[in-house]
């Protein structure tokens, strides 16, 4: 009894523009953490957790987990890590930008329904902690902008990914068409060569069946004329007439076969006329 394994989908790679935007956003979070004068006591904890987030994020960006279980574990771990950062000081609303980065990464890692399920979960995680820590209305007001950026960023990456996939398929289809065209041209050349060989065989059969028989008759008539020249010269003239007729017939047949061997007038354009 064979066990059916879950198929592993290839994980997409982000483009250079996306990578630059991602690390600029993280740099903004890092600088705002350093610039805040109210967390000097907890600054090492913030920096350590942010560095851990960045390390895990970068590892998953360049060597993404391909097994579905590890993908889920990674996003759950990163989401909890950001929640800890928000719980330490809810008024640091800029920390939710880290959920925006995870939304982009979810689009790169997941496919189908799982992709947008995680984008929705991360959007809720952007909003709910701030609403719980700062109040419903102030938290919602602070969360709307990062939520929108996270969804738009994820949609942009998804659309870019689809465009690249269409471009790859178009190039692959073009390569297949070029290969098919080469195969057709080769088949056409082979068919033309086969047709030429068949035509030569047909002409060879006609040459053997008609012209060779006529030449054989000419040979017999010539021998008969030699005998008449020695024994009965008066009967030589009719014999020579038959010999002339056979010779003209053989010449006509040869001309007909040679005419069939000539290329069409369109193919012989530009050739010197014999």
Image (cartoon, helix red, strand yellow):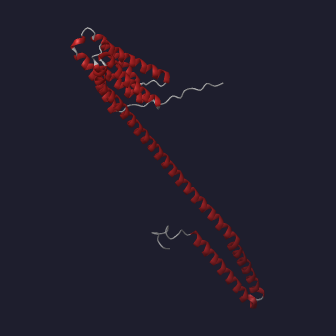
As displayed, is residue 187 above or below residue 151? below
Towards the viewer: 202 or 219: 202
Which residue is outermost to the right? 231
Residue at x 42% of width, y 42% of height:
167
Q: Position of residue 220 (x, y in %)?
A: 74, 78
Q: Position of residue 194 (x, y in %)?
A: 60, 59
Count the marks: 0
Residue at x 42% of width, y 30% of height:
116
Towards the viewer: 170 or 177: 170
As displayed, is residue 141 above or below residue 262? above
As displayed, is residue 232 above or below residue 89? below
Q: Is residue 8 left or right of residue 250?
A: left
Towards the viewer: 45 or 251: 45
Q: Position of residue 258 (x, y in %)?
A: 59, 72
Q: Is residue 234 left or right of residue 138?
A: right
Image quadrant of residue 233?
bottom right
As displayed, is residue 254 above or below residue 9? below
Image quadrant of residue 192?
bottom right
Q: Quadrant of the N terminus?
A: top right
Towards the viewer: 153 or 14: 153
């Amino acid at each position: 009894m064979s066990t059916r394994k879950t198929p592993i989908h290839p994980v997409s790679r982000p483009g250079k523009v996306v990578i630059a935007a991602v690390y600029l956003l993280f740099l903004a979070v890092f600088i705002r953490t350093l610039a805040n004068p109210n967390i000097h006591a907890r600054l090492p904890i913030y920096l350590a957790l942010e560095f851990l987030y960045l390390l895990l994020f970068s590892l998953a960006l360049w060597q993404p987990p391909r097994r579905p279980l590890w993908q889920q574990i990674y996003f759950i771990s990163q989401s909890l890590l950001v929640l800890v950062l928000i719980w330490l000081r809810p008024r640091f609303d800029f920390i939710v930008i880290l959920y925006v980065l995870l939304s982009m990464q979810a689009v790169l890692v997941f496919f189908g329904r799982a992709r947008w399920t995680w984008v929705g979960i991360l959007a809720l995680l952007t909003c709910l902690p701030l609403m719980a820590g700062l109040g419903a209305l102030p938290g919602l007001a602070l969360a709307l902008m990062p939520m929108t950026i996270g969804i738009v960023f994820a949609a942009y990456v998804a659309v870019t990914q689809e465009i690249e996939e269409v471009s790859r398929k178009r190039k692959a289809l073009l390569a297949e068409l070029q290969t098919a065209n080469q195969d057709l041209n080769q088949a056409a050349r082979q068919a033309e060569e086969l047709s030429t060989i068949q035509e030569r065989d047909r002409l060879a059969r006609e040459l053997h069946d008609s012209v060779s028989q006529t030449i054989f008759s000419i040979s017999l008539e010539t021998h008969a004329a030699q005998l008449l020249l020695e024994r009965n010269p008066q009967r030589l003239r009719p014999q020579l007439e038959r010999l002339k007729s056979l010779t003209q017939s053989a010449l006509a047949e040869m001309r007909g076969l040679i005419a069939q061997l000539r290329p069409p007038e369109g193919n012989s354009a530009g050739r010197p006329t014999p």
